Image (cartoon, rainbow, N blue to C red):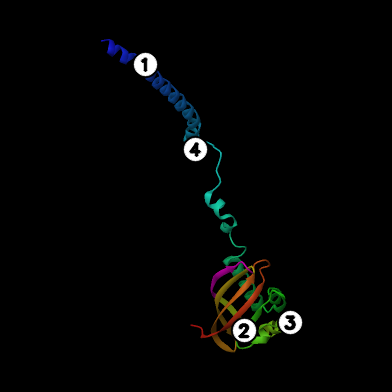
Amino acid sequence: MREQKNLRVAHIPGILRSMRTKSLNAHRLKAIAAMIMPMLVAIGCSDSGESTASLPDATTVATGSATSSPPCGANEARDSVERLIAAMNIGDAPSADALVARTPRFQWFSVNPERLNADASDRASLGEFLSAQVAVGQQTELISFSFTFYRAEDHTGNFAFRLSQRSAEAQPTEAAGKGAIDCDTGLIMVWTVGPRGPSG
């Protein structure tokens, strides 16, 4: 009996230490709960539609300016092409000339077979060429247009197109071409067009 009593007495310090540890753990759990509760409340409010502080969109932060749209696209490029065609159709060569970029942004204005190679790259002679073109009285219609790509290095919007061209002296013909606009000004930098054959 005495030995059992001694054993019980010997275990008392261990029991007291265990009780202290449990007490400390309880305090720690209460402290953690106090920190977590406001976060859970905020999440609950967000799910219910109530106003909470908004966090930045992860995609926007990660990519920055990469998510922004290019300065010009299909709408701007097509508008430049349609304005050039409209000016030519009404015989307004000066307005057509004003829609083409000046040097150094100008690259070439090529029309096969009338204006090729070195002539196509000569910006100074373009106004005279356009005046001769409108004098023929040819009418042009844009059949199709596609924006191919935007190039950030030189701020250009590139495109391809098909045209139907008709005049009083000849049957309608189709032409195909490609070009580029200066995205800073909307002016045409590159224009290349050539015949495809009779229009169906």
Would you name the residue on which mark 3 appears? 124
On whether residue 87 falls in the magenta region, the answer is no
Above/below status of 175 relative to 57:
below
Q: Looking at this rendering, what residue extends furthest in the right direction?
A: 124
Tell me, yes or no, if residue 115 can be seen here: no
Secondary structure under badge 1?
A: helix
Magenta-tinted stretch: 143-153
N-term mark: 4 or 2: 4
Give residue 107's quadrant in the image: bottom right
| Magenta stretch secondary structure, dominant | strand
Q: Mark 4 points at which residue?
A: 46
Tell me the SS state at disc 3. helix
Image check: 98 left or right of 196?
right
Tell me which label, 2 or 1, sits earlier in the chain: 1
Mark 3: give few (<14), some (14-19) or many (20+) Cα within 10 Å: few
Please name the residue that numbered disc 1 is placed on. 12
